[in-house]
């Protein structure tokens, strides 16, 4: 019976499978979102355990949130595709 070696990064930063519409920008944003959630979890645990002051935890999460929003904007997630011609928009 062969044991599967567990990568430290896979253990510390697990990734869930993506089930949405497969486009490169969606996959990148999903990875960013999962990383954000994992890091928020670590910060919350450190704050709850008294290892991180509440104001520092808040500032770190706020900075990560701004980074996630910037990523969403750069990847144009949730934006409507532009029309090729103006005739459809006028009708």
Image (cartoon, rainbow, N blue to C red):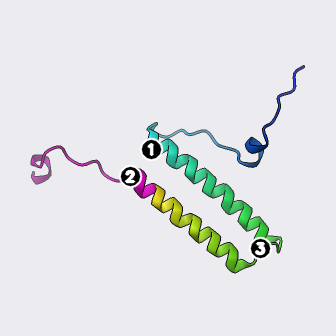
Which residue position is annotated with label 2? 76
Work out whether mark 3 precedes mark 1 in sequence or the reverse, and give the earlier one.
1
| Residue sitting at x 46%, y 36% | 22
Question: Does the magenta stretch mainly form a helix, a strand or a loop?
Answer: loop
Q: For residue 75: magenta?
A: yes
Label 3, on which residue?
52
Q: CA distance from mark 3 to mark 1?
A: 34 Å
Mark 2 or mark 3: whose residue is earlier in sequence: 3
Q: Secondary structure at mark 3?
A: loop
Label placed on residue 41: none
**Region rendered in magenta:** 72-91
Quarter residue 51 falls in: bottom right
Q: State the CA–CA distance, disc 2 to disc 3.
A: 34 Å
Viewer-closest of 8 and 80 = 8
Which structural element holds mark 1? helix
Q: Are marks 2 and 1 in contact (CB under 8 Å)?
A: yes
- Please state which of residues 22 and 12 is positioned toward the viewer in this rendering: 12
């Amino acid at each position: 019976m062969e044991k599967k070696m567990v990568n430290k990064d896979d253990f510390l930063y697990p990734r869930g499978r993506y089930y949405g519409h497969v486009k490169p920008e969606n996959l990148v944003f999903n990875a960013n979102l999962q990383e954000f959630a994992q890091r928020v979890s670590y910060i919350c645990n450190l704050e709850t355990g008294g290892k991180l002051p509440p104001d520092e935890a808040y500032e770190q999460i706020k900075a990560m949130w701004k980074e996630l929003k910037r990523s969403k904007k750069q990847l144009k997630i949730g934006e409507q595709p532009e029309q090729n011609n103006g005739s459809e928009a006028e009708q």
